[in-house]
């Protein structure tokens, strides 16, 4: 069974565990978004925004992260993304997106985001490439606003508040 | 000194290794002896000076072997090593073992025979004495047993088949009533202090007694030199702030105390001539109030230049506390009050620990201090570290607001903190947007006085130094969802927060903010 909609409310951490252990990275990515939406009561909306990200329960973030980390042997996960964000990208969201292979080109002018289906759902992907769905799923208004033709983040230019918000959230959760 | 201990227990053993003369050339034999000697040196089982050559012949001395003096429990180890060596480098070796009054002898070429000695050695040696000798040898090195020494003792205990209770008893006896080095140093300090209290500078005889004390405690002369120096210094400091208190207006009790202190001052000089009257300080006990005041003064001096007293001052203060007979609780209260006076308060009604923030501000680490401020507020006010809005901020107890403000104000000469921010707010006639512009949390783009566009600063663009505009810090990042992309403070939060400031710190009670007043 492959999850067809990210917003199905019934996904659990055990499901995430199962898909990750089978290296079903794309399905796991969708379940991750579903779990985050459920954790912030945004299942109906179907996408996250900065306000919601700031409210993600720390334990949920931690549980999800641990599963990605262990099944990918440290290749994927929020912690990996935060490390890259702090060190390699020095807090620059575009630089980060380029490093983890989310942009079409490494040149800033062509630095539009890939369409979600063109992401690399394998361990050959750059470090920190996943999870990504939480970042791609946008309201159609927001998608239009940033140049994504209403289809999410694909083809959009960097307006990476959500990325920043998650990094802030991770930092705060580390201090609990 | 260790020699004395060894002898008293008779736990030393001598192992003589004689290279058997089988008619080889004297030079060959000498080479073998030298090789054996080098090997034992290299093994480093015993200090080098315990390994000596055995020579024969008066007129033309020849080296025929090597003698090792060691603690009896090491015999086993030595024989094992030797046996190994002989297996690889066969050599006709005669081994004499001298333990106490007993003498054992064996000859071997390939080493097997050496091990046959072991059961005999074990039978010969009283297990408990062996154990005690080893424990004492360790204790002499530093007055306590280090972890690796403890581990070795445990192995030895196992090998000698001594019950744990017995081993513990032996160790207790060896280490004496003072189990670790600290306790021993402390004990020495106490005794020295008592001597000083009793009659000023100790006499030669007393010094000799003190010397015997530290030696029995297993302390080195270096350890003790530090303590002695420490005390001399302590007495000098007392002198400094007591001397001016000799004042004709003092009442008799005070004068007596002052005179007593003068004696201490003299005590730091060379020993007084015999027959000179000394007044013991204990003859006129200081009142508790006085003692507290004195301790306060001491502590103030100790933290004059740093947030915490140095290790050195710590020792000194502890002596002063005992000398003035104050309880640990009393001095702790003083220390907290004095530190708060000098370095800002850390009171909290939320049970928050502001010491780290104080430390960061003291070291002018504004960025870290800002982050710590967020951590404290989120820990205290919000569930699960979620950002705090204006309504939640109203739940911040005034005690905590005052503490936060006082700390930031103290270390920025009034430039930072809630009061500084409030002054800016008042100066901008309570307009939230102008406040945000004035503290430079928003960039205003415009022509002349006309503002065309404002945008929030990025957190990374904020200024973490004393050059920042008034009220720039601490930031209210605890209210933000994002930081690097934008540090956005809603205007409603500005109004809510200052409402709370007005409640906790009414305008008429505000401390003057020199930096602000100058700039206005």
Image: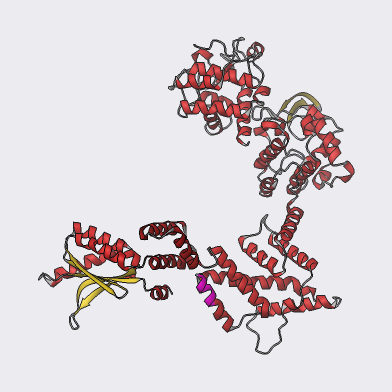
Q: Position of residue B356 (x, y in %)?
A: 66, 46
| Left or right of A52 on screen, residue B96 | left
- x, y (%) of residue B209? 55, 79
Judge whether residue B245 is colored magenta. no
Question: Measured along the vertical axis of the image, is residue B292 above or below residue B402?
Answer: below
Q: Is residue B511 above or below residue A6?
A: below
- Is residue B178 or residue A66 the one in the foreground? B178
Relative image position of residue B236 (x, y in whole percent): 68, 73
Which of the 4 quarters of the picture holds residue B93?
bottom left
Q: Whole-percent x and y of residue B397? A: 79, 39
Above/below status of A165 relative to B167: above
Please state if A163 lies on the left or on the right of B127 as rendered: right
Q: Which residues are magenta?
A: B211-217
The residue lying toward the viewer, choosing from B322 and B509, is B322
In the image as oriented, which residue stretches furthest toward the bottom? B275
Residue at 56% x, 14% y is: A154
Is residue B26 rendered to the left or right of residue A104?
left
Which quadrant of the figure has residue B226?
A: bottom right
Residue at horizontal 59%, vertical 72%? Answer: B228
């Amino acid at each position: 069974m492959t999850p067809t909609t990210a917003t199905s409310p019934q996904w659990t951490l055990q499901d995430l565990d199962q898909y990750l252990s089978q290296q079903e990275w794309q399905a796991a990515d969708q379940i991750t978004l579903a779990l985050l939406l459920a954790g912030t009561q945004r299942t109906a909306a179907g996408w996250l925004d900065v306000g919601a990200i700031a409210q993600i329960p720390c334990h949920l973030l931690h549980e999800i992260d641990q599963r990605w980390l262990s099944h990918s042997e440290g290749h994927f996960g929020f912690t990996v993304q935060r490390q890259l964000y702090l060190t390699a990208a020095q807090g620059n969201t575009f630089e980060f997106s380029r490093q983890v292979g989310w942009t079409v080109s490494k040149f800033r002018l062509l630095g539009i985001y890939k369409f979600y289906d063109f992401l690399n759902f394998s361990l050959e992907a750059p470090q920190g490439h996943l999870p990504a769905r939480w970042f791609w799923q946008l309201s159609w208004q927001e998608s239009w606003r940033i140049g994504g033709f209403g289809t999410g983040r694909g083809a959009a230019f960097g307006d990476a508040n959500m990325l920043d918000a998650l990094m802030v959230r991770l930092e705060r959760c580390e201090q609990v | 000194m260790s020699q004395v201990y060894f002898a008293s227990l008779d736990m030393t053993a001598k192992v003589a290794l004689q290279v058997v003369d089988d008619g080889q050339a004297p030079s060959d034999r000498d080479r073998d002896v030298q090789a054996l000697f080098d090997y034992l040196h290299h093994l480093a089982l015993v200090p080098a000076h315990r390994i000596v050559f055995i020579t024969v012949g008066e007129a033309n001395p020849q080296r025929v072997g090597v003698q090792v003096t060691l603690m009896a429990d090491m015999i086993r180890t030595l024989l094992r090593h030797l046996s190994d060596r002989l297996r690889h480098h066969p050599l006709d070796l005669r081994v004499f073992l001298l333990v106490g009054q007993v003498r054992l002898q064996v000859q071997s070429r390939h080493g097997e025979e050496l091990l046959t000695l072991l059961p005999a050695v074990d039978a010969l040696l009283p297990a408990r004495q062996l154990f005690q000798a080893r424990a004492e040898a360790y204790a002499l090195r530093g007055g306590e047993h280090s972890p690796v020494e403890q581990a070795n003792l445990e192995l030895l205990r196992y090998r000698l088949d001594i019950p744990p209770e017995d081993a513990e008893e032996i160790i207790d006896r060896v280490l004496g009533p003072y189990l670790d080095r600290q306790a021993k140093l402390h004990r020495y300090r106490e005794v020295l202090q008592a001597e000083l209290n009793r009659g000023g500078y100790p006499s030669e005889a007393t010094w000799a007694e003190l010397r015997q004390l530290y030696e029995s405690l297993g302390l080195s002369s270096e350890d003790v030199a530090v303590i002695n120096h420490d005390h001399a210094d302590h007495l000098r400091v007392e002198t400094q702030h007591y001397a001016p208190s000799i004042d004709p207006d003092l009442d008799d009790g005070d004068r007596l105390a002052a005179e007593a202190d003068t004696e201490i001052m003299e005590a730091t000089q060379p020993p007084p001539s015999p027959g000179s009257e000394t007044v013991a300080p204990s003859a006129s006990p200081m009142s508790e109030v006085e003692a507290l005041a004195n301790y306060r003064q001491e502590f103030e001096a100790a933290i004059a230049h740093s947030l915490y007293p140095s290790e050195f001052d710590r020792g000194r203060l502890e002596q002063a506390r005992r000398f003035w007979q104050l309880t640990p609780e009393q001095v702790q209260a003083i220390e907290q009050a004095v530190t708060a006076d000098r370095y800002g308060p850390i009171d909290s009604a939320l049970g928050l620990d502001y010491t780290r923030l104080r430390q960061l501000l003291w070291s002018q680490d504004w960025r870290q201090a800002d982050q710590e401020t967020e951590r404290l507020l989120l820990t205290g006010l919000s569930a699960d570290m979620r950002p705090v809005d204006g309504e939640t901020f109203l739940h911040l107890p005034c005690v905590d607001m005052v503490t936060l403000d006082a700390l930031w104000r103290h270390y920025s000469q009034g430039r930072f903190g809630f009061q500084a921010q409030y002054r800016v707010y008042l100066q901008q006639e309570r307009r939230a947007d102008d406040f945000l512009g004035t503290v430079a949390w928003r960039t205003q783009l415009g022509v002349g006085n006309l503002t065309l566009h404002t945008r929030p600063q990025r957190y990374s663009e904020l200024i973490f130094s004393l050059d920042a505009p008034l009220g720039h810090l601490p930031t209210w990042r605890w209210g933000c969802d994002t930081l690097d992309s934008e540090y956005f403070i809603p205007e409603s939060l500005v109004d809510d927060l200052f409402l709370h400031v007005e409640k906790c710190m009414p305008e008429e009670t505000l401390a003057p903010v020199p930096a602000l007043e100058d700039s206005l």
